Image (cartoon, rainbow, N blue to C red):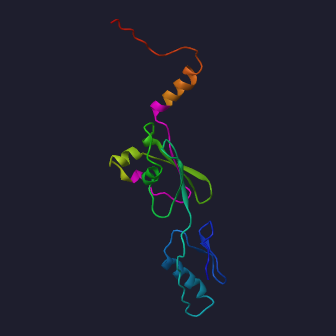
Amino acid sequence: TVLPVRPDGIISMPYAQAVKAAGRTPEDVSRDLAASYGKVLNDPEVAVIVRSFSDYKVHVGGRVVRPGVFPLSGPLTVTQAIFQAGGFQQEAWLSQTLIIRKKPDGQPMVICVDLWDALEGRDLRQDLQLRPWDVVYVPDSAIALVNKFVDLYIRKNIPANFGFRFDVPI
């Protein structure tokens, strides 16, 4: 019997309890199913074979070269996801990179990681393993925010030319 894994990571079979499959090995799921079927059958043998992998995805946005949605087909860290998105832009604030993740109760939580420390080799624990449907956001650096403020609130609102010109006699 071919069974899809539900979005909540559970598989359901007749006479067996709902069994969590997502994030577990086929051997672990087989053992749980055999134990569940052992209540109604004598010495059941259960084999779990993975036919295909889910199309889990992660979202990467902010100051990256190509923001978008990327497949999560195996282990993937925050920096690996950013590099899939073409790397970070010069204006990126790597020490304030955000991961938005859903808690088991469905509520979002925000994790701030310092990718600068990870990339410099000071704290590799900052390069977290991503989970399905995580959102990685690389914000603007402080100087990029200042530049954006100057552009939006000064250059575009004051009708003056802020350029400089030097005339040099020859």
Q: Residue furthest right?
A: 14
- Say which residue appears at 50% left-offset and 40% top-offset: 139
Position above or below: 13 against 118: below
Residue at 63%, 82% in the rendered image:
16
Answer with left or right where residue 161 lies relative to residue 83. right
Q: Which residues are magenta?
A: 125-144
| Residue 60 point in image, percent of width and height | 52, 49
Tell how many labels: 0
- Residue 14: percent from the left, percent from the top? 67, 82
The percent coordinates of residue 103 (x first, y second) are 58, 57
Does 127 appear in magenta?
Answer: yes
Q: Quadrant of the C terminus?
A: top left
Relative vertical location of residue 27 with respect to residue 63 in this rendering, above or below: below
Q: Is 149 located above or below residue 29 in the figure?
A: above
Quadrant into which the N terminus falls: bottom right
Query: x%, y% of residue 109?
Result: 56, 51
Instruction: Name above or below for residue 68 compared with residue 93.
Output: below
Query: Residue drawn 59% across and 68% down?
Result: 9
In this orientation, which residue lies closer to the viewer: 75 or 29?
Answer: 75
Q: In the image shown, does 30 or 143 lie closer to the viewer?
A: 143
Say whether residue 38 is magenta. Answer: no
Q: Looking at this rendering, what residue extends furthest in the front direction? A: 170
Residue furthest to the top: 169
Image point 57% across, 25% down: which residue? 152
Q: Which residue is at the far bottom?
A: 42
